Image (cartoon, rainbow, N blue to C red):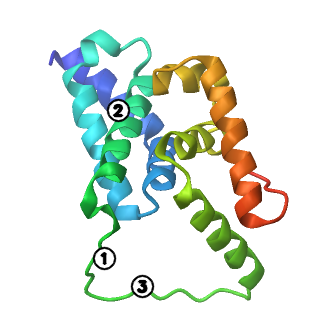
Amino acid sequence: MHPDQQRDFADFVAARSDSLIRLAYVLTNDQHAAEDLLQSALAKTAGRWRRIRSNPEMYVRRVMYHEQADRWRSPWWDRERVVDAVPERTTGDQTAEVETRITLDQALRTLPVRKRAVLVLRYYEDLPESEVAKIMGCSVGTVRSQTHQAITRLRELVGEPVTLEA
């Protein structure tokens, strides 16, 4: 990679990493897996930087979506992960918020990969339907129908109105 391209890539990574790691975390639901996913996507992006320099963020998002979809399909995804120590955090009573998040997370996990991804991209990342369609490689109509079906299913599973926040 040419030094100018390296500088452009480094600037892109510095400017967009916070946003991209949040997307990766929502897709993986695990900080370490999110970091691995983002690192892998950025490595693929660096190799194609000259060709995708005009819109690199969409390329990185697309790579993360496809890599995570492959991970969801693989049989090892639901295995437990061994850690040295369980992290401890102390906060005020957030029981209601935690229960809501757990319920929504469990409901999201039951959705097929594409429906979950469309919700993450539309509501968590707050992307327009056209950009979600480009990332997922489908039509805007498919994004709309997948979104509607996913929200309907979440409402059935949760048993109350689902509010997805950006």
Q: Nearer the viewer, residue 83 or 72?
A: 72
Where residue 66 appears, as percent x and y from the top left, is 36, 36
Q: Amino acid at mark 2?
A: Val
Question: Where 33 sits versus 122, above or below?
Answer: below
Which amino acid type is shown beneath numbered disc 1? Glu
Q: Is residue 14 left or right of residue 79?
A: right
Q: Nearer the viewer, mark 3 or mark 1?
A: 1
Question: Crowding near pointer 1: few (<14 within 10 Å), some, many (20+)?
Answer: few
Q: In the drawing, what numbered circle is on residue 63? A: 2
| SS state under label 3 | loop
Residue pointed to by mark 1: 80
User: Gap in Å between the C-alphas at discs 3 and 2?
Assistant: 30 Å
Q: Which residue is mark 3?
A: 87
Q: Residue 117 location, x and y as percent? A: 52, 42
x and y, in percent, of residue 27 in the image: 47, 50
Check whether the beta carbons of the residues at disc 1 and disc 2 lie within 8 A of each other. no
In this rendering, which labeled residue sits more in front, label 1 or label 2? 1
